[in-house]
Amino acid sequence: KCVNSPYKSVGPCPELNSPERPLIPHHLNMAVSPRVLPDRTGIFIIAHNNNTIELLHAALISFLNFDHDFGTNSALQAISSDNTCVLGLVMVASILILGGCSPDDSHVKSILQRAKERLENVTPSVGIRERQLVQAASLYMNGYRYQAMDLWENLIYESDCLNDLLAAKLLSSAAFFTGESRHGRIARTTETMLLAWDKNSYLRTSEYYSHLLSLNTFGLGEFMHYAKAERSALKALALYPSDVFALCTFCHVMLEQGGRTQEALHLLSTTEEKWNVHGGLVCHINWYWALFYIEVGMYDNALELFDRKIITAVQNSEGSMLDVTDAVSLLWRLELLHRSVGSHRWDAIYVVLAPLITPISSLLHVYSICATHIMVLLCRADSNAAAEFLRFLTDDNIDHSKLIPSDELYLKHQSRRVGFLLCEALYNYFTEENFQGALSNFLLLRNYMGCCGGSLPQHDVFHQTLISCAIRLGRLKLASSLMVDRFSSKQSNVTDFFKECINNHQR
């Protein structure tokens, strides 16, 4: 199991514990050309028969759908039934690697090694895409995330019909976790793909088309092109009403624009049976649902959602980092609004997560967006563990500050540095009540919070905490200015609460 993964764990690869039958006898030093077949998008891949093609298709659809296993079960079946299949191996490895596994994870390393072994004696002109996917996965696992994203993007642009949807999905996921999506990379890449797909009658009418639209919707939403994002989301949902990713971004758009809370609440309540079948993102949709309740002051409804659905999702996923992040974020936001959430709710999250974060040093490999939320959880449920986590982060930050700041190293550790400073600010705020120390860090990072990864709605809680710091310190002009700055680009009814706090201090 990948301990720090936002995704659910997957079972062991069927062949990893025993020697695999080689494609050719090892004593024959010659290259072979395994069979290649076109997949459902027309890309030729190494596959012994159509059964492998269908299993890999099912795996990609599950990955795009955010199903419970993210497609790994079908990929493992393809690996088991076809000893030439490389794509299944690299899909499983990439999903776990994007989940944030440690560079030392022996299980994932063994999967990548098996993929390399299957390619070892293959004619160089065959399996070029598979080789590049293995290379990208290895780069990402070892911290060279921007180089990996460049490889995935190159695979898209060099495909015959810009039809490499797997590379687009991997690129989109990586951009989310690294914060790269805010620069418009996913929006531009997917719009270029859509231009090609719209000219291709097969791709335009394929099962994959709605999923490309949903990736485009996400990219546009993160790039703050909300009108275009909404049009793309509605088009995707019209083609595939269960498209949970398109729905997620549509919720993002309605939350950012403000004044659409009732519309959002109606949409989520009347379509629940369509989107709740995709377990990998159900918790996040329920998180949005709770945020809309907060927007209209229905705090008890938000807590009810936590009790009925969100904490259940955390338990069912055995501590998926994405689900934990949603659960913590909701309680955190309510506390910033001076709403009591009860220590039992913090404890309910912590009891699931605690076995996964022992020792605390294992958290050093967690994505920064997840680490910040774990810090808040520890501050609320185990202050000693929070202090220990901060010590590890401090030592790790000092070690990396000594590195030569080459372009790649700067990009590699930028997110880590921002994550450390945010965790330090949150520890000061929640445990030490050192609001001045917290404010200093938050102000330093105010325009760089996206570097820690995650989406714009997830970053919003940092900005709310910054405003809360300023109010607690009596720096009301600063608080007012920060509030105007925040809500000039993001309309929200939460402003009424902060305005009331400022007015009360002024009295």
Image (spheres, rainbow, N blue to C red):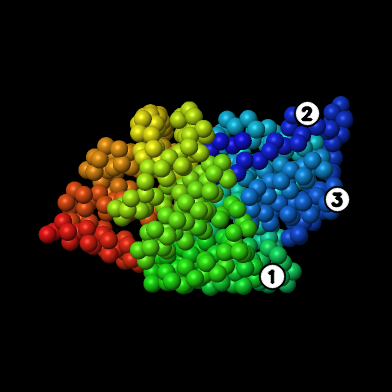
Residue tagged 1: 204
Which numbered disc, 2 or 1, marks the residue that appears first in the sequence?
A: 2
Residue flagged by tag 3: what amino acid is it?
Asn
**Contact? badges 2 and 3 (CB < 8 Å):** no
Q: Against 426, is 402 above or below?
A: above
Front: mark 2 or 3:
2
Which label belongs to residue 156?
none
Residue 18's label in the rendered image is: 2
Q: Amino acid type of disc 2?
A: Ser
Q: Residue at the location (80% across, 36% down)? A: 121
Does residue 183 appear to the left or right of 159 in the view shown? left
Callout 1, which amino acid?
Arg
Instruction: Name which quarter of the figure residue 389 lies in.
Output: top left
Residue occupying the point 67% across, 43% down: 92
- Choose top left, top right, bottom left or bottom right for residue 241: bottom right
| Mark earlier in primary sequence (2, 3) | 2
Task: Give the residue pinned by disc 3.
Answer: 49
Query: Picture coordinates of residue 218 (x, y %)?
Result: 52, 61
